Image (cartoon, helix red, strand yellow):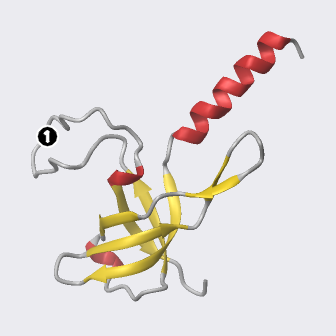
Amino acid sequence: MTAENRLFESLVHRIKMSIHTNVPCRVVRYYPDTWEADLEVLLKQVVKSGASFKYPMILRAPVLEHVGALLVGDVVFCGVSERALDNLQRVPFDPEFSRTHDLKDCVVIGKWKGV
């Protein structure tokens, strides 16, 4: 493999690792009145040196209604929005923010059974 190919492959890998789509998480706190949860991401970030780090805590992620009530320690599956959800409303809207695939825009979409 040429040096250019290695550079390109490295760049592609870094981009892929920065795009969040779905992540397993553990419920740290549940807010039943607002259907939100504080979450710990169960995957770790791994850097080029091989060192691994925890992702930051996801605070007050919305929980979809069909998921039901959560308990501390539940393992959930979360979807990450393509764009910022700060201004979500019932009609098409301009997200206003440039965030894409950010863990801040995570939504609890399901609960694992037996994990």
Can you give x and y, in whole percent of width and height, for residue 28 in the image? 42, 79
Residue 95 appears left or right of 2: left
> Which image quarter: residue 71?
bottom left
| Residue appearing at x 40%, y 46% in the figure | 102
Can you give x and y, in whole percent of width and height, for residue 53 in the image? 62, 56
| Residue appearing at x 38%, y 67% in the figure | 108
Residue 55 appears left or right of 65: right
| Residue appearing at x 42%, y 57% in the figure | 79
Q: Amino acid at mark 1?
A: Pro
Number of on-image labels: 1
| Residue appearing at x 32%, y 81% in the figure | 30
Viewer-proximal residue among 54 and 115: 54
Look at mark 1 in the image and give the residue it sits on: 92
Tag 1, which secondary structure? Answer: loop
Residue 57 appears left or right of 91: right
Where, quadrant-wise, is the C terminus in this rendering? bottom right
Viewer-proximal residue among 80 and 29: 29
> Which image quarter: residue 99?
top left
Please say if 27 is above or below 7.
Answer: below
Where, quadrant-wise, is the N terminus in this rendering? top right
Residue 28 appears left or right of 10: left
Please say if 36 is above or below 84.
Answer: below
Estimate how packed mark 1 is, as few (under 14), some (14 to 19) or many (20 or more) residues with alpha carbons within 10 Å: few
Can you give x and y, in whole percent of width and height, for residue 112 in the image? 53, 78
Please say if 31 is above or below 42.
Answer: below
Please say if 61 is above or below 20.
Answer: below
Viewer-proximal residue among 66 and 85: 85
Which residue occupies the extreme right position in the image? 1
